[in-house]
Image (cartoon, rainbow, N blue to C red):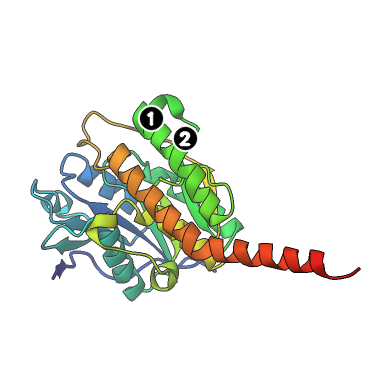
Amino acid sequence: MTNADAHAPGGGLMTSGSPVAAVVIPAYNEARTMRDIARRAAAQLPLVIVVDDGSTDGTAAMVAGLPVVLLRNEVNLGKAGSLRRGAGEAVRRGAQLIVTLDGDGQHAPEDIPLLLEAHHASPGHIIIGARLHRREKIPAPRYWANRVANFWIGLAAGYSIADSQSGFRVYPARIFSEARVRYDRAHSFVFESEVLIEAARLGVDAICVPVSVTYSARARASHFRPVLDIARIARMVAWRLVAHRLPSLVGLRRELVQRRQQPH
């Protein structure tokens, strides 16, 4: 069970002819960077939702006095569960677009307009803030783990994805209600991969937009574990391929065999 503390004047963002957009920031022990990220995000969009995922370092206190909505999970739900909860609150407040970014400072909130501009140019798509073009700024284990993930997720989704692991995204809000993905804690870092595959099944592809990236010494150590989390992603992709792609490939082979057997 969770509880909610709404500390912001409600509402959302409606610009002339544009969809309502909200920022959702999942945060677990991000006290050192949370205030700066939330403040800068609030300068880009009026509705910013911070989901404190059972932090023990005072993360929630860091946004006191800022014009943001604070949701607090009594226990740690994981990134996927926190994103889902934040997106649900955003939709309740009228959001049609969900902008997600991490609270550790690697994503620059000032790049939010770049992602929204890409969305307006290609409505209905997921927009990903891609980092891998800045290879020199990314720790080597994370860079190569991301490259491996990109290959397998692109294979399952049916198209190439330049940065499948970036959490800096713009989602059509309907993805959170229509995509059949898991939000449990064990699959926290699998969610952002699985949702791309599931979205492709719904006819929603992702477009990658180059953004800046910063790995600050002030930030806490990454929760992403390259070996374990990539193994979980690979297992999810294998299951998706077997469950969804293999039957269609078997059917295609059967159809080709039948065509060869038919007289010309």
- Residue type at the position of mark 1: Ile
Most foreground residue, 238 or 52: 238
Most foreground residue, 223 or 256: 256
Is residue 205 toward the left or the right of residue 255 in the image? left
Element class at badge 2: loop
**Residue at 33% over, 62% down:** 47
Residue 200 on image: x %, y %: 53, 62
Is residue 167 toward the left or the right of residue 80 in the image? right
**Residue at 32% over, 58% down:** 24
The image shows residue 202, relative to residue 161, as above or below, that is below
Residue 100 on image: x %, y %: 36, 54
**Residue at 55% over, 52% down:** 118
Quadrant location of the C terminus?
bottom right
Is residue 75 toward the left or the right of residue 26 in the image? left
Residue 211 on image: x %, y %: 47, 39
Quadrant location of the N terminus?
bottom left
Is disc 1 in contact with disc 2, using a CB cutoff of under 8 Å?
Answer: yes
> Is residue 230 shown to the viewer in this render?
yes
**Label number found at residue 138:** 1
Mark 1 vs 2, N-terminal side = 2
**Residue at 21% over, 46% down:** 35
Give the quadrant of residue 224: top left
Looking at this rendering, what residue extends furthest in the right direction? 264
Residue 180 on image: x %, y %: 40, 69
The 10 Å Cα crowd at callout 2, few under 14, some 14 to 19, many 20 or more, is: many
**Label number found at residue 132:** 2
Most foreground residue, 129 or 229: 229
Most foreground residue, 44 or 157: 157
The image shows residue 144, relative to residue 194, as above or below, that is above
- Residue type at the position of mark 2: Leu
Give the quadrant of residue 66: bottom left
